[in-house]
Image (cartoon, coloured by chain):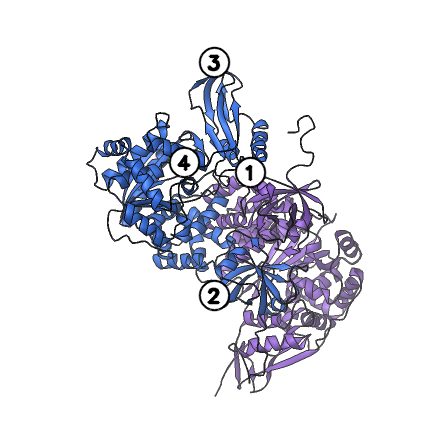
Chain colours: A purple, B blue
Amino acid sequence: MEKNGDRVTASPNTLRLKRLGIDTHQEAVIYMRSDCHVCRAEGFATHARVRVTVGGASIIATLNRITGDLLAPGEAALSEIAWARLGSIKGAAVAVSHPRPLDSLSHVRAKVYGRRLDDAKLAEIMGDVVAGRYSDIQLSSFITACSARGLDRAEIVGLTRAMVAVGERLDWGATPIVDKHCVGGLPGNRTTPIIVAIVAACGLTMPKTSSRAITSPAGTADTMETLAPVDLDLAAMRRVVECEGGCVVWGGAVDLSPADDTLIRVERALDLDSEGQLVASVLSKKVAAGSTHLVLDLPVGPTAKVRSEADAESLGAHLEDVATALGLRATIVRSDGRQPVGRGIGPALEARDVIAVLQGEPTAPTDLQTRAVMLAGALLELSGAAEAGAGVEMAESTLNDGRAWVKFQAICEAQGGIRTPPMSSHRQPILAHSSGCIAAVDNRRLARAAKLAGAPDAKAAGLELHTLLGQQVEKHTPLFTLHAETRGELAYALDYIDSHPPIVEVEQTS
Amino acid sequence: MEKNGDRVTASPNTLRLKRLGIDTHQEAVIYMRSDCHVCRAEGFATHARVRVTVGGASIIATLNRITGDLLAPGEAALSEIAWARLGSIKGAAVAVSHPRPLDSLSHVRAKVYGRRLDDAKLAEIMGDVVAGRYSDIQLSSFITACSARGLDRAEIVGLTRAMVAVGERLDWGATPIVDKHCVGGLPGNRTTPIIVAIVAACGLTMPKTSSRAITSPAGTADTMETLAPVDLDLAAMRRVVECEGGCVVWGGAVDLSPADDTLIRVERALDLDSEGQLVASVLSKKVAAGSTHLVLDLPVGPTAKVRSEADAESLGAHLEDVATALGLRATIVRSDGRQPVGRGIGPALEARDVIAVLQGEPTAPTDLQTRAVMLAGALLELSGAAEAGAGVEMAESTLNDGRAWVKFQAICEAQGGIRTPPMSSHRQPILAHSSGCIAAVDNRRLARAAKLAGAPDAKAAGLELHTLLGQQVEKHTPLFTLHAETRGELAYALDYIDSHPPIVEVEQTS
């Protein structure tokens, strides 16, 4: 309330922004001095959620108080994500106030206590989630409540629609738009670039957005980046797809289903992935991408995400059911999820496998080729490009006669120019301690060794497998080879391998 | 793995500690440069949970990465709580590594999916909670799962025992040890110091630990601090109780049920307080404090925590039942929770009400006196100091003949010396806009105005109510008076009152 114009002109809640460069990942944080007049006047406690306004933009942030002299009186700072969301500049005026109550939290509480969430409530929750109004504590409560109480079919459909509605949605002006998704990836399972090349060569449209690695040694976007640029914006992506019928770009630049990115981070921290949330997560990305025909690959294995045929049955039925409700046509394919696919693990090493398959090299990994052909075949049939039962043959011949390789090169050129994957400068084979049969491969520790060697940041880093389950090896045969870009990282991965039980287990056959 | 002694001698994971003074409340955070060799070598992502070791002590912390030059190469920093937990010193060496997997999270997931938590699992979870191994996301999931799936009687008892087991537990070597707890406090309801004085004067032992304000304008410890020191450690508290039979000290210095403090912070952020968790929270503090006889006050009112007689019935039954299982004797008292109690709101102003009641001043607030006498009477009967039905009379005469006042002064002296509550230097009465009847008091906004005026940090700040529900007032009569220690804070509270609907509603009687 301004009275007579003789009150203070600058709002007493205004501070000047300083940049501290603190990366808190997705959580918006504001840093204020603990003796700050705004803290005291507003009665803010540490860890309170406060409304932060810079220029015309507002977000909700968590308050951290500074007790030393990191900030001068009258200064405040923002975490990097808050800085970016507000489009801040150094020295700008920042106003801080109490946020309006978050009404959608009452829907979360209602779900905790067993009530259903209708479409309007789910839309409200997702709106607040993408606006960054939920703290980690509140996000976690929503995810846990949905897991504990479960989501029925209508709720999953409503959640998926709400997740689509709060992000970008692509419209390609034509059908079919095909896509493929693998639930719970296996190390090295880089079928996507091969499938895109095959189906685009057959005349289908497959505008593929893919992710970078979060916890794995490589995501499809990391691998593809060693072959062509992937940081395309929506306009550039459209040009590639219009010209070549397909692309493999990084989804992060396109902003499809941003709510999903937020929820997935918290689900990972909890190691919770309920079927309903998994279904909404997968399908929201596909609907937002404008897909109409979808092949879903469910690898089944003891260390895969889907552990048993019964789980695959249930998840597959849910995915198909909800996809239908959302107007998508979907085919579920179950595959072998017991060991890595291909030979390379790490961006450039996986890219070499992809190129070997596309070029039809005699040494190309047959497991990767077989999978890619099977999934491409399913897409060709689902979309009507091939008769029922004739998809695999069509995919195979498109690969064998070189049309897929020609198409792949054209896509890479359209994305900004084809590249040769880098070669590692430091290598070290890991040898079998004894002769015998390969009895087990620890996928988790294999991935960890590849990461310690530098993947995915160091594109050429990772490892190359030389053996498969059930193979016989002689003592001192290389089981796999570590690849690194620096001597230090190679040493670091070797230290890890030296100080742990064998990653590839050889059973002595005496 | 050290080999031949010719490898690097300092661990490659060691950094030097710098103090940044960032207060993140209870969440332990480590700040590391994003180009730090340890981050890269270990494959840490921002927001990862990492194990931090300084000297012999280890904690789990969340990683924030620094992109600017806040930290020099080779430096790391800790949030204040992490600094304190590790007993760190500037320049000390800090080692960072991957934490061991948190096994107890699988019990949380099991609860999410509907399985019961037995005593051993609850003990494991609480052990990890007090050790600071749970992130906010994980704490929130535990609390939400317990609310969504509910806790049965055995689980509540198990949770309460587990919360007690991970903190200090006091043993007074005698019984009865009496205590009183009010579930969901009302503004100004400062009966505790009066009750302690009465029952100690009657020969009972009441070693009372109380809390500071978190979201209210004053906690009992804040109020008591204007009358005597409350920051006593366990040894000093024992001396006071042995000498005088009672005390009123701040519980934070004694560390009873530290798991409860952690859980309550997250429950507040979620606005979730399920009956099971409430019961475990209240009773764990009491068992840890060594109490044997307990009076539980349940104020019932539309804006109180307990909203209906039915809710009070259910909660009361649960409290009594679980208390019995834990070997406590408990009496439930339901009281009127429709408006504030006493006249003052704010530490010193509430202390003046307490003193007025103890000194038997004719102007003392009768509602506060009546409540204190009723609850003290219930304690006297429960513990056997008074015959059934004779407790209130015994409490009343102890208050009226001055014995309670004498005892209270002795307790204050034993705690370090009696003090006179400070007087505010700036005051402003808020007047009725019209004549009429007091129809409603908005407790929430009343508390907010008191906090804006400076309470509880400014001890003399707050407000003084001059009217009660149903009273007739003339136009321009003072409804309440604001108290502040600075002109600025008074202006701030006045601005708030000016720009909002009336806090005390006067209904015109024309």
Q: Which mark is residue B57?
A: 2
Q: Residues within 10 Å of mark 1 (few under 14, many from 20)?
A: few
- Label 3 sits on a secondary structure element that is loop
Label located before the other in sequence (4 or 3) = 4
> With B294 as the anchor, is A299 left or right in this view?
right
Letter of the chain that mark 2 sits on in the rendering: B
Q: Which mark is residue A101?
A: 1
Distance CA(mark 1)–CA(mark 4) = 33 Å
Distance CA(mark 2)–CA(mark 4) = 42 Å
Verify CB contact (< 8 Å) between mark 3 and mark 2. Answer: no
- Judged by depth in the image, the label closer to the viewer, 2 or 4, is 4
Q: Residues within 10 Å of mark 3 (few under 14, many from 20)?
A: few
Quadrant in which the N terminus of chain A appears: top right
The amino acid beneath tag 2 is: Ala
Q: Which residue is mark 3?
A: B509
- Label 1 sits on a secondary structure element that is loop
Residue B42 in sight in this render: yes
- Give how far across and how far down residue A235 sits, in percent: 78, 51
Q: Which residue is mark 4?
A: B351
